[in-house]
Image (tube, rainbow, N blue to C red):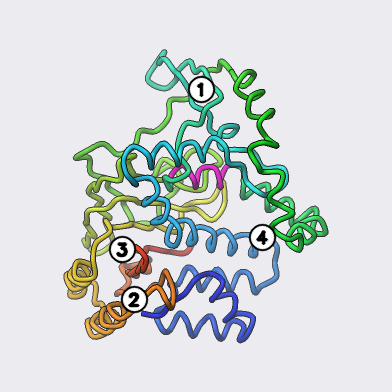
Amino acid sequence: MTPLTRSAAFTAYIGGGLDAIRTLGLAGIIDSATERAWEQIDSGDPAQVQAGNRTLLYREQHDIVDMFYVDMHGHSPPSGRVFTYLLTLAATPAVPGTKSYCDVIPLTLSAPISRRARVAMRTPPAAGNLALFTNRWELIERDTLPVYQRLIAEHAAEAHALIERPIAQRTGRFRLLRRGGQIVLALVTHWRLALESAPALLVAAGEEVTIDLTMPPTRADVGLADASESRVWTNLQRRPFRVSVSLSGGRTFSTEAVLAVLLSPEPDGNPTRLTVKLPATDLAGAQSTLAELAPEWQLDEAEIAKSAARAAAVTTASHVYSTRVFGAHPAGFVRLEFQLEHHVEQDEYVVDGLFSWDA
């Protein structure tokens, strides 16, 4: 297993261009979606560059930093949940023009008036916690990423100047003492009464999620909301639930998962990618999972053994995160890969099922 972060891939790209990125892909260090993202960025087409950057951002939030948030959230209950919620209330993105979590996704007190609608009182606090991927990604998708994309497209000079500004100079406006008046004003004024659609429910205990990939799914097939680019299945307790993915040829991928995300490349597009995150485990557990998957999905068992041996020798002196991707036999139109994440500081391993297909 080889250490890799987004900055390392960037270094490879700067040094060797797409050839270096494809070498990482052939070595099983990055998956096909990440390799495709760099191809989109290399194209220079603004729309393709945005799509590629979004894929890398998703990888950062879903694969790399999520475990750190999970650890913070679960630290010394209930202090971890309290701390991360207070962080959610006080934090605001660094991109000019973006909104805070409380502004975008406020806590809503509601009363149903039908199966499809409810009367809702929106309050100043946040309806979620940035330590949870589903909440964090919703904020990114609904506000942070679109505002950032407009910034670099319409105000490139301002974006460049912001990037060049030292971090010490940028952090001043985010200090609580400086923002205290704004926070108090929001607590007093940010109350709204509205009529809105009933929200989708989180996955309940014992519930099974079934996803049909026997044919390329449409937005309507998977219940993607208007203008949404993702559908997320999880629960607040990070408890495992059953996920079954039906594939062509009568094949089914079935597993216990803590997170499943279906992605579309654009707000009004059909989905083209599904990621299924299995529960965190130790090295022996991850190796056992991959060994069980190998016969049916034709994974390279020798490479699995080699990656396990390399991972066992890794220490935090070299890196804090690494991945190894194992290519599987395609299932009709679906490209299938399995990724092993190694979170070195926590000494935890996560296996991801990665499904992708063309639009």
Say which of 332 and 211 sits in front. 211
Three-letter code, disc 4: Ala
Residue 321 relative to residue 161: left or right: left
Where are the magenta residues, as a range? 134-142
Residue 170 seen in the current view: yes
- With respect to residue 56, does 24 lie above or below? below
Three-letter code, disc 1: Glu
Going from N to C along the chain, the mark reached first, 3 or 4, is 4
Image quarter where the N terminus lies is bottom left
Callout 3 touching callout 4 (CB < 8 Å): no
Q: Which residue is mark 2?
A: 327
Q: Is residue 135 located in the magenta-colored stretch of the structure?
A: yes
Residue 359 seen in the current view: no
Q: Which mark is residue 350?
A: 3
Q: Which mark is residue 47?
A: 4
Alpha carbons under labels 3 and 2: distance apart:
16 Å
Q: Which mark is residue 196?
A: 1
Q: Secondary structure at mark 1?
A: strand
